[in-house]
Amino acid sequence: MEVTSESRQHIEHLAEEALTQLDSIAAAAKSKLLDGRTLGSDALASINTMTSSSAVQRLDQINQANRDSYSVLEREPAIARVVVADEEGEERTYYICRTTPIAGFPNLASYRAPVGRLASLTVGTEFTLPNGDVVEVLERAHLRPAALADGWDSRDTVVETEHFGPLTIESLRALLTEVVGEEVTEDLLGQLLAEETVKANIIDGVRRSVITKMGLRDQPVLDQYQDEIFRLPLDKRLLILGPPGTGKTTTLIRRLGQKLDTAFLEEGEQRLVEMVATAQGVAHANSWLMFTPTELLKQYLKEAFAREGVPASDLRIRTWQDYRRELARNAFGVLRTASGGGSFVLKDDLPSLSEEALERPIQWFDDFNTWQRNAYVQELHEAANMLREAKAPDVQSLGERLHRILAQAGDGALASTFGALAAELPKVQSLVASLKETSDKKLRESLNLQLNRDKTFVGSLGKLIDSLQQTSLVEGDDDQDEEEDESSPAKTPIEKVVAAYNQAVRAQARASVSKRTVSKTSRNGKIIEWLADRGLTEADRAEVGASLLVQTNARRFANPVKRYLDGIPKRYRAFRRERQQAQSWYRNEGFEARDIHSLELDIVLLAILRAAGDLISRPNVLRDIDSPAWSALQPILGHYRNQVLVDEATDFSPIQLACMAALAHPQLRSFFACGDFNQRLTTWGARSADEMKWVFADFDIKEITVSYRQSKQLNDLARAMIRAVGGTEQSVSMPVHVDSGGVAPALLEYASETEVVISWLADRIREIERFVGQLPSTAIFVNSQDDVPAVAEALNAALAEHNIPVIASDGRTVGQEGNVRVFDIQHIKGLEFEAVFFVGIDQLAAKHPALFDKYLYVGTTRAATYLGVTCDGALPPAIESLRAHFGLDWQAPGSLQAGTEQ
């Protein structure tokens, strides 16, 4: 473009100043790193020998944070330069950096700081500085620093002022080294070349960057709207919706980076996170958790986290599938373990759920949660009544007091009931301990009698128990009353035999008094059958049974919070059995009582998390959480995090999202999710804003609509695709002043032979490399993991002559740079590439009819500039209307006629 001499002079001044500043900041940071002097633990100890280790540790953390900042500044001294003017017209220049600024540069500010917002504001925008001064943005430059052998440069710098721009300057350094003038007037060719170099270095508008490697595109400065979202207070429940390529995930990561840095939190937020960190023993910087739908996306995002200075270990970024199993198996005892804990066996493909449960998960959960809560309260009432009817006066008296507490509570909150029951806890514990001592003595005498008669008794019983462990037995209803009979778990072989004997004999005594039988197919039933008459005498059985019934009913009040939470899995089993008989939520047959579907497990976990959360959210409960009444909540408190984040939120069900939300610490309730309903790739994924509002009634839903990823051609195709398949229409705009031009997507039909498809793919990939000048990030999507190796091998052979490696992705690892990658379509959520090829799109329609439109939309919107599609036959009827957007190769669209074989 033609640049006026005045504008050129201004740009040259900007370039000289900016490069000098970059060099000064980088040099200062390097000096700090080389100096290495810090006020460390040795120096601190010499100042005050009484200094606490926590203070020393805190100082070391500050020193490490400073070193990390210096390292960033040495590599990338600044990301923006902004000139503002106050109301008196006095101008100030700010440089904005990605990290904490270094001392000695008063005009250098962190992007995370309030002043950093200047980098996102357009020219002419007013802004109130932290000191109250109102300024107007006069000029803005987004810098991309590059350290060269002979000094600093900034590549593809975008400059915008009141008078011109935006302009993209390929190299600031080149502006200062160009030689145009009298010295070359006699060399006409040299003069022409020099003038051409000047013109080529300054480009009108903003140039789109090419995606050269597999990873989230770096966007050092967010746009004005994204910036506003990421700066919202920590204690917000935020949902960001928007079409592909609008920077949702980038905004999420940038927000996390800022909120983890306590220096940039508000004073009230700082006090709160320090208080929570002290109580939980987990530093705020480590108290976060992010969920992604796939393992591949988790790995893909790690580099983006590293750019923000956020260590993203596998403990922080999780898939819900893995975290759910960990919670259910190791924390809440829902899933069975080899050591004997847990109730259920998880089976992802269990045919247990009806269409009603899949279509109405919120109503399904509400039905269960109401049922199980009522069942628990009813259990307490029955236990109190049983104690009132006991023979012993002290037991009757206790039962009366417990009955009054329950009657006063009515249908009110369980928290108040638990609080009132806490006063009776010492009396309940004393009664249970006394009765247990007597009944245990009877059991011990009985076992000693059998040992005196038969020295091999324990060994023989041990063999039976070992054999029972090898077989799957039905868990009897009598087992649930044994939960707290054993004071400590048995460890030695003999202890285990004694424990099994006691458990079976207790079950028999309890059943005898209750006028019911022990299930013959249960573990206890098998042991009772083997014992025959070698258990308690009939008289002792009646006495012990009566005592055990009192103990069982009294125990319901010994630790009611623990019993409420721990009993939820068993109550779920009873609920499922009842609803199954009523033909509601569940299928009638095809699964065993011990098996559980993953979506059922979500229901159970949410009931536990919400029940605990309702209690912990009460100030008096949190204050007294170490007391016996509330101590059962401590393990759940340990799973809370200061920030919970979810990428691709619409792939998760409302129940799953509610589980994640319930992991946000109740004192902060900081939750940030992003997604797009048109990109939902699971049949159970959230479908509407109303479902999201069920998770948090005060969910603040924001929409961002500027699409930065795709060319205009591919953006037009995506919008036409939404209309063709009946998706949710979205208001999408292209970024202003950005060159969003590209090429038409390419289509190959009637290509059922592998050789034809591979040859076409290879030709298109070679063309892309010639167009771009290098091989950009390129992906091939196929319809199943079984197709991945064969396509990768064949394409690798076809491209070998040009040394373009093709690798098969396992869906879990990112792989090496510079490779063409072949993916199963199910793994590609959230990724982006410069070029994407979709193989056998008509077969996808047959393989995933319910989600075909979603897979199609997600697959095609992974591409930034180049999109190639192949069909075994013709374009599927559902998207025939899109034919006009395609060409045979990277030519003008509309060159293909329907129904013609190529």
Image (spheres, rainbow, N blue to C red):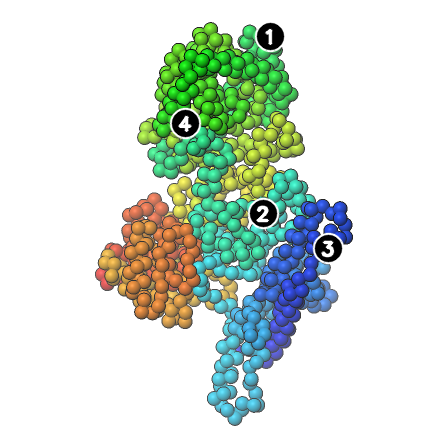
Q: Earlier in the sequence, mark 1 or mark 2?
A: 2
**Residue 286: which disc?**
2
Residue linked to disc 3: 43
Residue linked to disc 4: 576
Label 4, secondary structure: give it: helix
Amino acid type, mark 2? Asn
Q: Nearer the viewer, mark 2 or mark 3?
A: 3
Q: How far across and down, in percent of the image, does residue 710 sit?
A: 44, 60
| Residue in front for this viewpoint, 79 or 182 | 79
Label 2, secondary structure: give it: helix
Q: Is residue 162 visible?
A: no
Q: Residues within 10 Å of mark 1 (few under 14, many from 20)?
A: few
Amino acid type, mark 4? Arg
Amino acid type, mark 3? Ala
Q: Is residue 298 above or below residue 77?
A: above
Amino acid type, mark 1? Pro
Q: Nearer the viewer, mark 4 or mark 3?
A: 3
Q: Is residue 870 visible?
A: yes
Q: Earlier in the sequence, mark 4 or mark 3?
A: 3
Q: Earlier in the sequence, mark 3 or mark 1?
A: 3
Q: Name the quarter where the C terminus is drawn.
A: bottom left
**Residue 699: which disc?**
none
